[in-house]
Image (cartoon, rainbow, N blue to C red):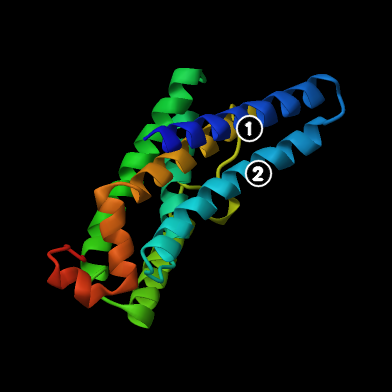
Amino acid sequence: MKKNLKTNLIWLAIIAVVYAILSALIVAGIINAFVAQIITQIGINLIVAVGLNLVIGFTGQFSFGSAGFMAIGAYTSAIVTARMAPTWGTIFLSMLIGAIIAGIVAVIVGYPTLRLKGDYLAIATLGVSEIIRILIMNGGDLTNGAAGLSGIILFTDWGMTFIFAVVIIILILNFINSPSGRATLSVREDEIASESMGVNVT
């Protein structure tokens, strides 16, 4: 317990120092708006990569569905934001709604497809992502088709992305070290042995 607490405090101190350094560089003008936008994109891609690593790396399931679920969350958030008054409450509410809808679709799709394995799972999830892409492309005025949504007020900056990335990483690390996470790792190592020990592999 003390070892974990010490490790967490060390990582928290490193994160605080990195945040302070980036803030100081931006305030001093050394990091301009363009570089700050690149840092924001890095943070968003980091969140996506960590989520993908949870599915492919820790569970050992070869899935191509992450991009489709990201698209659902992003488009839902953008649509809600565009139709409500631009406030901080709106942006967080839109992110919550996007996460809920993407989660519901993921459960509906994931429960039957996770009975598949290997290449079959990859093909099924690739098909789901393609269906989501086609629905977005043919969404009419709701998604604006291939042109995408425009005129959305940008609230996200590098600081918000940095904080969200840290929170997501901490959540996934805690999940991996939890009983459910260890069961997930056991499925990756040997699915048959895990199922024989009472783990619900699906």
Dot 1: element: helix
Q: Amino acid at mark 1?
A: Ile
Residue under the point 21% across and 77% down = 192
Q: Residues within 10 Å of mark 2 (few under 14, many from 20)?
A: some
Compared with 182, 122 (above or below) is: below
Judging depth in this view, the residue of 141 and 158 nearest the camera is 158
Judging depth in this view, the residue of 175 and 202 nearest the camera is 175
- Residue 41 image label: 2
Compared with 28, 156 (above or below) is: below
Residue 24 figure quarter: top right
Determine the residue located farthest toward the front in the rendered image: 2
Q: Is residue 139 left or right of residue 21?
A: left
Judging depth in this view, the residue of 73 and 79 nearest the camera is 73
Judging depth in this view, the residue of 118 and 186 nearest the camera is 186
Residue under the point 43% across and 37% down = 4
Q: Amino acid at mark 2?
A: Gln
Dot 2: element: helix
In the rendering, at what x and y percent does residue 121 appear?
Answer: 34, 75
Which residue is denoted by mark 1 in the rendering? 14
Residue under the point 40% across and 68% down = 63
Residue 65 appears in the rendering? no
Residue 111 figure quarter: bottom left
Tell me the mark number nearer the camera, choosing from 1 and 2.
1
Of the two numbered discs 1 and 2 on the same chain, state the one appearing first in sequence: 1
Could you tell me how far apart the alpha carbons at marks 1 and 2 are, in whole angstroms? 21 Å
Compared with 125, 177 (above or below) is: above
In the rendering, at what x and y percent does residue 80 appear?
Answer: 42, 32
Residue 150 appears in the rendering? yes
Q: Is residue 14 left or right of residue 105?
A: right
| Image quadrant where one finds the N terminus | top left
